[in-house]
């Protein structure tokens, strides 16, 4: 038994009928078109993933820069607990 109850002989007969109907040139063209579409899809997915990674890195750099700025500002402000309280 082959795939889903279809034997290898039945698959060969179906393949022969498809070749007779469409011809080898058209089948070759359809195969290359399908291969090109798959390649384009893979390239688009890879490009999209690279763009996401780049965007995440830029966001991390921006967040780090903001954190460093906040840390510098808080370290430069004087500590109010060191000054005597005028109300006491």
Image (cartoon, rainbow, N blue to C red):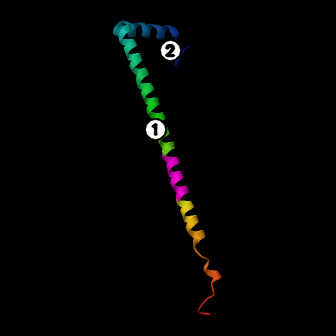
Residue 72, image quadrant: bottom right
Mark 1–mark 2 contact, CB under 8 Å? no
**Observer-nearest residue: 71 or 45?**
71
Query: Which residue, as the protein is rendered here, is positioned at the far bottom?
Result: 88
Q: Position of residue 53 (x, y in %)?
A: 51, 43
Q: Which residue is labeled 1 in the image?
A: 48
Residue 30 highlighted magenta (yes or no): no
Q: Is residue 79 left or right of residue 57?
A: right
Q: Position of residue 37 (x, y in %)?
A: 41, 25
User: How many other residues sit within 10 Å of disc 1, few (<14), some (14-19) or many (≥20)?
Assistant: few
Helix, strand or loop at label 1? It is helix
**Observer-nearest residue: 3 or 67?**
67
User: How many other residues sit within 10 Å of disc 2, few (<14), some (14-19) or many (≥20)?
Assistant: few
- Magenta highlight: main SS: helix
**Residue extent of the magenta highlight:** 55-65
Going 58% across and 69% down the picture, which residue do you hit? 74
**Observer-nearest residue: 71 or 22?**
71
Residue 78 marker: none
Residue 76, image quadrant: bottom right
Q: Position of residue 29 (x, y in %)?
A: 37, 14
Helix, strand or loop at label 2? It is loop
How many marks overall? 2
Going 64% across and 81% down the picture, which residue do you hit? 81
* Distance (Cα) linking label 1 and label 2: 40 Å
Residue 56 highlighted magenta (yes or no): yes
Q: Is residue 37 left or right of residue 88?
A: left
The quarter of the rendered structure image containing the N terminus is: top right
Residue 6 marker: 2
Seen in the picture, residue 81 relative to 14 is either above or below; the reply is below
Seen in the picture, residue 9 relative to 35 is either above or below; the reply is above
**Observer-nearest residue: 10 or 43?**
43
Name the N-terminal-most of marks 1 and 2. 2
């Amino acid at each position: 038994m082959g795939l889903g109850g279809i034997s290898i002989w039945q698959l060969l007969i179906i393949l022969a009928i498809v070749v007779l109907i469409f011809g080898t040139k058209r089948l070759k063209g359809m195969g290359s078109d399908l291969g090109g579409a798959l390649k384009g899809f893979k390239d688009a997915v890879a490009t999209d993933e690279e763009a996401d990674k780049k965007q995440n890195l830029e966001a991390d750099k921006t967040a780090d820069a903001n954190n460093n700025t906040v840390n510098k500002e808080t370290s430069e402000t004087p500590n109010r607990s060191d000054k005597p309280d005028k109300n006491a």
